[in-house]
Image: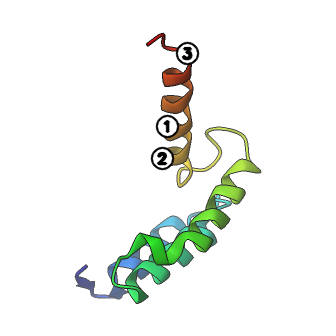
Amino acid sequence: MKNTESGTAEEGLCSFLDMPQKDPCQKQACEIQKCLQANNYMESKCQAVIEELRKCCARYPKGRSLICSGFEKEEEEKQTLKCTPQ
């Protein structure tokens, strides 16, 4: 990722998410970005921090965390597949 005037792109994302009503899972999302950057974007090396984000997302109602919206969509797709006859 490119550097921005105020730092790295990851820092920019984390700063952007620090809005008046802070996303409850922002800290975990930033930890994932740091881990991925430190491990050459090898997702397998960051499973522990990804799991921490999943745990955080599970603590809040659907729609409360913008960061968790990807996990919510993933869960909806899994449910749709379970309900679809094959």
Q: Is residue 75 left or right of residue 70?
A: right
Is disc 1 placed on a helix, strand or loop?
Answer: helix
Residue displayed at 48% across by 13% down:
84
Report the disc number at residue 70: 2
Question: Which amino acid type corresponds to the residue marked 1 in the rendered image?
Answer: Lys
Viewer-nearest residue: 54 or 44: 44
Which of the two discs, 2 and 3, labels the residue nearer the N terminus?
Answer: 2
Q: Which residue is mark 1?
A: 73
Mark 2 or 3, which is nearer the eye? 3
Q: To which quarter of the image does residue 37 belong?
A: bottom left
Residue displayed at 67% across by 52% down:
57
Which of the two discs, 1 and 3, labels the residue nearer the N terminus?
Answer: 1
Residue displayed at 39% across by 78% down:
10
Q: Is residue 21 left or right of residue 45?
A: right
Is disc 2 placed on a helix, strand or loop?
Answer: helix
Q: Residues within 10 Å of mark 2 (few under 14, many from 20)?
A: few
Is disc 3 placed on a helix, strand or loop?
Answer: helix
